Image (spheres, grey):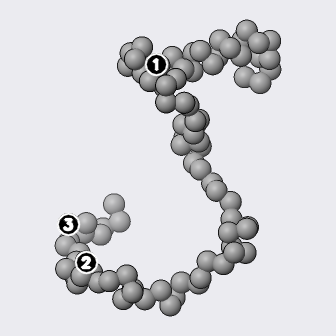
């Protein structure tokens, strides 16, 4: 460990912070986000999360979930069989 005492109580005055209005927050040290910023921005998703970013229609997902607890493995298995039967195995 670094020797820091993680058992110390925070010195933050949480009551005062919770009582603040949004207008009272000082953003002066943060540059504004311009249109140019958003034009150049790139969405980066960590690889483990990216594997779970498939949009599935709710009725399809409900059907797979109704098959039992291993519905994610079942979806993967069905997709793998589709690839194997399509003759496009080089992508796997």
Q: Name, please, the residue furthest toward the front.
A: 59
- Total number of numbered discs in the rendering: 3
Q: Quadrant of the N terminus?
A: bottom left
For discs 1 and 2, the disc positioned in front in the rendered view: 1
Q: For the point 42% across and 14% down, which residue is it? A: 67
Q: For the point 71% across and 16% down, which residue is it? A: 83
Q: Label 3 vs label 2: CA separation?
A: 23 Å
- Give the residue pinned by disc 3: 7
Q: Residues within 10 Å of mark 2 (few under 14, many from 20)?
A: few
Q: Name, please, the residue furthest toward the top.
A: 85
For discs 3 and 2, the disc positioned in front in the rendered view: 2
In x, y percent, where is residue 41?
68, 65
For discs 1 and 3, the disc positioned in front in the rendered view: 1
**Side (left or right) of 59 relative to 10:** right
Residue 22 visible in the picture: yes
- Give the residue pinned by disc 2: 18
């Amino acid at each position: 460990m670094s020797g820091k005492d993680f058992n110390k109580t925070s010195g933050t005055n949480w009551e005062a912070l919770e009582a603040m209005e949004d207008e009272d927050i000082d953003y002066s040290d943060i540059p504004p986000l311009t249109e140019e910023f958003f034009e150049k921005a790139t969405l980066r998703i960590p690889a483990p999360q990216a594997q779970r970013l498939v949009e599935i229609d709710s009725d399809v997902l409900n059907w797979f979930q109704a098959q039992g607890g291993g519905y994610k493995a079942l979806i993967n298995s069905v997709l793998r069989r589709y690839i194997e039967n399509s003759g496009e195995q080089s992508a796997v």
